[in-house]
């Protein structure tokens, strides 16, 4: 079977340490028209993933140097949004959920049928093509957004955001150096200025502010400033002026 000729060949990364498993997969995928790179441990996998542009990645769970789950987590935190299928020898649900939580899009359990792997890969590539996901997501200071999962990361901490909070954060980043007007928030998040009350916007802004403040530290500072009567602007630590150390009068 060959890929239809109107479909461009997809470039894949396989991270698998056992050659006895990796080689037949590569041979099969190449016969289908895919181009496949092989990384034989987690560290090599990270290097490949961050330096090349792949359409999808197949990552084994049990890997030398850096296990597959940690690798996926590291890639997502660095803003990599390439679709990932996790290959795992374990079948328990807890294990799979933990892999998906780490940032995998799908998984196949070993031993898997080659047909199943191909079908899942095709489905994943279709989804990612239709969503036209950029290779890397937004990044702002220590903040990165992963649009495939509505998730935000500040340094090592991940933020679980409600859909509207995530959209607001995305908009704030789009307007990063300008004031984001409330009217734009209403139109882009609620669909119309008529559909939303001031209170609903305030609640969403304060919800997002609270979640950002939970992951603040001396190393990571993010703030949503209110510009009265206009809207909001997001700033990270390098853009926030240091607190005034000198005051006009001495009150001590
Ligand atoms: Ca392995």
Image (cartoon, grey):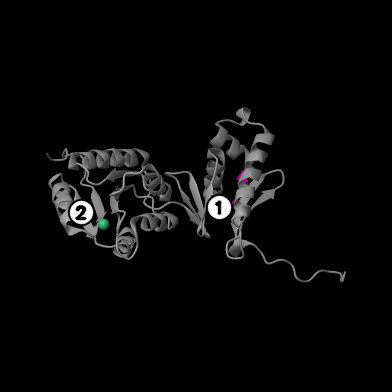
Instruction: Measure the C-alpha gap from mark 1 to mark 2.
Output: 37 Å
Q: Is mark 2 within 8 Å of ligand 1?
A: no
Q: Secondary structure at mark 1?
A: loop
> Which of the two residues, 6 or 90, is positioned nearer the viewer here?
90
- Give the x, y percent position of residue 207: 63, 44
- Give the x, y percent position of residue 130: 34, 38
- Does the magenta-highlighted stretch encompass residue 201? no
Q: Which residue is mark 1?
A: 176
| Residue at 28% from the left image edge and 44% from the top image edge | 108
Q: Relative to 60, is 170 on the left or the right?
A: right
Nearer to us of marks 1 and 2 is 2
Q: Residues within 10 Å of mark 1 (few under 14, many from 20)?
A: some
| Residue at 54% from the left image edge and 44% from the top image edge | 161
Q: How many numbered circles does the render carry?
A: 2
Q: Quadrant of the N terminus?
A: top left
Q: Hey, which quadrant is residue 230 in on the image?
A: top right
Q: Residues within 10 Å of mark 2 (few under 14, many from 20)?
A: some
> Which of the two residues, 75 or 145, is positioned nearer the viewer here?
75
> Is 140 situated above or below 187?
below
- Give the x, y percent position of residue 232: 64, 47
- Give the x, y percent position of residue 40: 24, 62
Q: Which residue is mark 2?
A: 36
> Which of the two residues, 152 or 193, is positioned nearer the viewer here?
152
> Is 58 situated above or below 46?
above
Which span is picked out in magenta?
A: 176-181
> Which of the two residues, 206 or 28, is positioned nearer the viewer here?
28
Q: Quadrant of the C terminus?
A: bottom right
Magenta stretch secondary structure, dominant: loop
Identify the residue at the far top of this view. 194
| Residue at 53% from the left image edge and 39% from the top image edge | 163
């Amino acid at each position: 079977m060959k890929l239809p000729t109107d479909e461009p060949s997809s470039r894949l990364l396989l991270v698998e340490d056992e050659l006895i498993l990796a080689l037949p997969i590569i041979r099969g995928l190449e016969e289908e028209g895919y181009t496949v790179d092989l990384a034989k441990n987690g560290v090599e996998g990270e290097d490949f993933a961050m330096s090349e542009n792949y359409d999808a990645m197949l990552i084994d769970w049990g890997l030398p140097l850096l296990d597959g789950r940690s690798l996926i987590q590291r890639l997502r935190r660095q803003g990599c949004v390439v679709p990932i299928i996790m290959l795992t020898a374990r079948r328990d649900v807890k294990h799979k959920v933990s892999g998906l939580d780490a940032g995998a899009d799908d998984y196949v359990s070993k031993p898997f049928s080659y047909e199943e792997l191909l079908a899942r890969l095709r489905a994943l590539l279709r989804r990612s093509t239709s969503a036209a996901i950029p290779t890397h997501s937004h990044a702002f200071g220590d903040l990165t957004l992963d649009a495939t999962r509505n998730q935000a990361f500040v340094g090592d901490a991940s933020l679980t955001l409600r859909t509207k909070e995530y959209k607001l954060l995305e908009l704030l980043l789009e307007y990063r150096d300008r004031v984001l007007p409330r009217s734009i928030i209403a139109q882009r998040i609620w669909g119309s200025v008529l559909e939303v009350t001031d209170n609903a916007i305030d609640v969403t802004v304060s919800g997002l502010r609270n979640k950002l403040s939970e992951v603040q530290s001396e190393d990571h500072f993010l703030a949503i400033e209110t510009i009265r009567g206009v809207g909001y602007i997001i700033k990270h630590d390098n853009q926030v002026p240091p607190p005034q150390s000198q005051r006009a009068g001495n009150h001590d």
